[in-house]
Structures are given as structure tokens and as C-alpha cells.
DNA sequence: AGGTCGACCTGGCAGC
DNA sequence: TGCTGCCAGGTCGACC
């Protein structure tokens, strides 16, 4: 999916364009993305409610609706997209379309149908939010907190970064880029990192995510922002999906390995 | 209890 | 051309 920078980009775009508008209709083309309740019940809850504010927590988008308390939560997972259009356009991946009172159509597209659309009165009822670690770009996320968490884990630091109880919103692309920026080998046991390495890691998390947000995310494959456009951080990616290509720092070929069943890209020359 | 693995899905691409 | 197998940005539950 979209990781934190991509989801944050969508949030900002939608916040500028659809606040205070009302959901007038919900049209289903594939109901598999509605999981816990019937599509009819889902539709009934949303109809007539106004979008007060759009938040993000980790990789989830949270639409705060009025009358309260109702939150419409979207998890895009691997291939979900939220695209705002002036006309309804049904594509193969189009699953649900929300008709808004400003005459716009918010399309939920999802090629692989992993995404989830939920309505809840209390976010804490969702397991995802109960277990989620701190927001990496918030003041509450400190080097101290990262250090406390990292020191108790024996598994590889790459897997600890991907674990959303450590820190929210980091996925496979940014885990690779963050570890490259920090010069840390993704295979290192987390508990073995020295203080200065954890400091470097902390700074890399902030720096890479901030830069990616400012560039509107990366588009490796299916990610699109709320206007259907690609993000430009793709042009600044150093190691992700670049197996065999020269490391921009030391010119060694980039390596690909598998950790916990997922690809890891890194430079053996300068990540120690 | 921490950690890993398969399941959930579809589509693109490499190799034969 | 067409088949097979592999791969993909995430999360959860089952299992060791």
C-alpha cells in the first residue's frame, strides 16, 4: 500500500476538497471490501452524513462524520486508491463510489481487494488502532522511545521497523530507504544496535518520511493520489527495487534478500 | 510472548 | 501465443 507519505498526501488533498460536503449516495461495484457489516447497513450509516474532518493514523484514513459519533475508516492496504473525480468512471478496479454534495465522485479502487472500508463509532474497537505505535512525525515520537522499543527486540531491525507497534506507518519501501539513509544493515538484530546507531536511525526515519511527504509519496506501481497522479519520491529512491544497480553512495551493486517473507533491498558496501 | 508463516486477491512479467 | 510460476507498497490469525 501506500505507506505513511502516500496516505498523508491523499489526506491533505481530500481535506482541501471535500470538507463539509455530504455523502448523498454510495454505489457498489464489488462489495468484498465491506467486511464486517452488510453493504446495505454500511450505506445506510453513511447516507446524509457530512465530512467534518479527515485524519490519518498510521496508514489508515479516518473520515470524521457528522452527526457524530461515526468514523469512516479506509485502509488502502497494497493497491487501494481514493480518487476524486468530476464524473463517475468505472474502471476494472473500481469497487465503491461515494457521491458527494459538491457534485464530485470519490472512487475507491482496489486491484487486489485487500483494502477495507469500515464504519465505527469508536476507533478503539479496531484492533489496528489499539496496537499502533507512535506517529513518527509527531512530537510524541522521541529517540528515547525508539531506543526503548528497539532494545527489547532480538529480531532483525528491518522487521522491527515494519512492525507497526514500534512506529506507525512505515512499510517495505521506506524501511529500506530509512536503513540506507542511516547506514545500518537490515539484518542486524535490533537489540544489538548502539546508541549512536539508534540516533542515526531516528533521524533517518524523520528525514526520509518528511521528504517523501513533501514530494507527495512514491509511486512504484499502483499508488495514486486523490487526483489520480503519481508521487515523485520515486525519483529519490536509493535502494528499493534496485537490485544489481549501483549504490549511489559507494557504487556497490544493491542486494536483495528475503526477511520474514518480504524483499529487503540494501547496500552491503555501506550499510554495516 | 516474540516471532514467523500463510492467507487474503488480482494482474504483470519473465522464462520456456 | 500461451502456459506456469513468481512477485507486488499490508494486516491478521494460527502456530511454534
Image: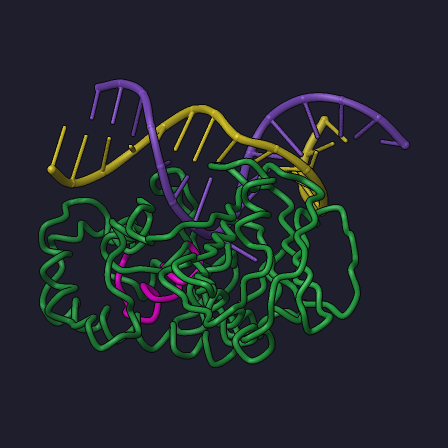
Chain colours: A green, B yellow, C purple
Nearer the observer, A198 or A24: A24
Name the residue at 57% across, 47% down.
Answer: A44
Say if A247 sits above or below A129 in the image: below
The answer to which quarter of the image holds residue A14 is: bottom right
Say if A119 sits above or below C16 in the image: below
Name the residue at 36% across, 62% down.
Answer: A57
Q: Is residue A47 left or right of residue A129?
A: right
Q: Quick check: is A131 in the magenta stretch?
A: no
Q: Is residue A191 left or right of residue A17?
A: left
Q: Position of residue A206 (x, y in %)?
A: 30, 75
Quadrant location, the C terminus of chain A? bottom left
Q: Position of residue A271 (x, y in %)?
A: 29, 63
The number of discs equals: 0
The answer to which quarter of the image holds residue A47 is: bottom right
Name the residue at 48% across, 65% down.
Answer: A7
Magenta span covers which residues? A172-185
The answer to which quarter of the image holds residue A97 is: bottom right
Nearer the observer, B3 or A126: A126
Q: Is residue A210 left or right of residue A233?
A: left
Residue A266 in sight here: no
Q: Quick check: is A184 in the magenta stretch?
A: yes
Q: Position of residue C8 (x, y in %)?
A: 52, 47
Q: Is residue A29 left or right of residue A151?
A: right
Residue A230 in sight here: yes
Q: Main secondary structure of the magenta part?
A: helix
Nearer the observer, A31 or A251: A31
Q: Position of residue A268 (x, y in %)?
A: 34, 58
Name the residue at 44% across, 65% down.
Answer: A64
Nearer the observer, A153 or A196: A153
Amino acid at each position: 500500500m501506500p505507506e505513511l507519505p502516500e496516505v498523508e498526501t491523499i489526506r491533505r488533498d481530500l481535506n482541501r476538497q471535500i470538507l463539509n460536503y455530504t455523502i448523498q449516495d454510495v454505489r457498489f461495484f464489488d462489495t468484498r471490501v465491506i467486511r464486517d457489516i452488510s453493504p446495505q447497513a454500511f450505506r445506510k450509516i453513511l447516507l446524509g452524513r457530512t465530512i467534518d474532518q479527515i485524519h490519518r493514523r498510521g496508514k489508515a484514513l479516518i473520515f470524521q462524520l457528522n452527526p457524530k459519533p461515526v468514523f469512516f475508516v479506509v485502509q488502502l492496504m497494497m493497491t487501494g486508491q481514493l480518487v476524486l473525480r468530476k464524473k463517475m468512471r468505472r474502471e476494472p478496479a473500481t469497487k465503491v463510489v461515494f457521491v458527494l454534495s459538491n457534485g464530485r465522485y470519490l472512487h475507491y479502487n482496489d486491484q487486489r481487494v485487500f483494502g477495507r472500508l469500515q464504519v465505527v463509532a469508536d476507533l478503539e474497537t479496531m484492533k489496528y488502532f489499539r496496537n499502533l505505535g507512535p506517529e513518527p512525525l509527531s512530537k510524541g515520537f522521541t529517540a528515547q522511545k525508539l531506543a526503548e522499543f528497539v532494545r527489547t527486540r532480538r529480531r532483525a531491525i528491518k522487521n522491527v521497523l515494519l512492525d507497526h507497534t514500534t512506529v506507525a506507518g512505515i512499510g517495505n519501501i521506506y524501511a529500506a530507504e530509512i536503513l540506507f539513509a542511516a547506514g545500518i544493515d537490515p539484518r542486524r538484530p535490533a537489540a544489538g544496535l548502539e546508541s549512536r546507531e539508534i540516533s542515526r536511525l531516528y533521524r533517518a526515519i524523520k528525514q526520509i518520511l518528511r521528504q517523501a511527504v513533501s514530494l507527495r509519496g512514491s509511486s512504484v506501481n499502483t499508488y495514486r493520489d486523490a487526483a489520480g497522479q503519481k508521487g515523485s519520491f520515486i525519483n529519490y529512491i536509493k535502494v528499493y527495487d534496485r537490485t544489481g544497480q549501483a549504490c549511489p553512495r559507494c557504487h556497490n551493486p544493491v542486494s536483495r534478500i528475503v526477511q520474514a517473507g518480504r524483499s529487503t533491498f540494501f547496500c552491503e558496501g555501506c550499510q554495516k
